[in-house]
Amino acid sequence: MKPALILFAHGSRDAQWAQPFDALRTALAPRYDVELAYLELMAPTLDEAVARLAARGAERVRVVPVFLGQGAHLKRDLPALAAAAGARHPGVQIALEPAIGEQPAVIAALAAAIGRG
């Protein structure tokens, strides 16, 4: 069984906004059982994504926020959503990771991409 992973993004009213997240999910799919989840305005929710992974047998889920930084959504909202999902799915351990944009490799990749312009 592949490790379970949820890419957690904000969400938007514009469906095209999600295209980079879909591409990221596709890139990770060979190595992970991966779902997308959104804070608002789009589906699935974090709870729905956890439920999908649990239905496929996941016992441990890593949640990676695809945000550039830790704001109120990641400091306050995400832990509350994860706790609620964990209560509804007691057989699943949910591990929250820092915002992807705070990781040194991501900062370096962004700087390299910007520097090419």
Image: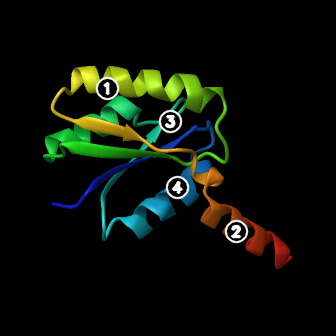
Q: Which residue is mark 4?
A: 21
Give me the disc on residue 115. none
Depth check, mark 2 against mark 4: the one in front is: 2
Coordinates of residue 56 in the picture (x, y in percent): 15, 47
Coordinates of residue 8 in the picture (x, y in percent): 48, 42
Q: Which residue is mark 3?
A: 42
Q: Is residue 37 left or right of residue 11?
A: left
Depth check, mark 1 against mark 2: the one in front is: 2
Q: CA distance from mark 2 to mark 4?
A: 19 Å
Residue positioned 43% across, 69% down in the render: 27
> CB of mark 1 within 8 Å of CB of mark 3?
no
The kind of residue tagged 2 is Ala
Depth check, mark 3 against mark 4: the one in front is: 4
> CB of mark 1 within 8 Å of CB of mark 2?
no
Q: Which residue is mark 1?
A: 85
Q: How many numbered discs, if any?
A: 4
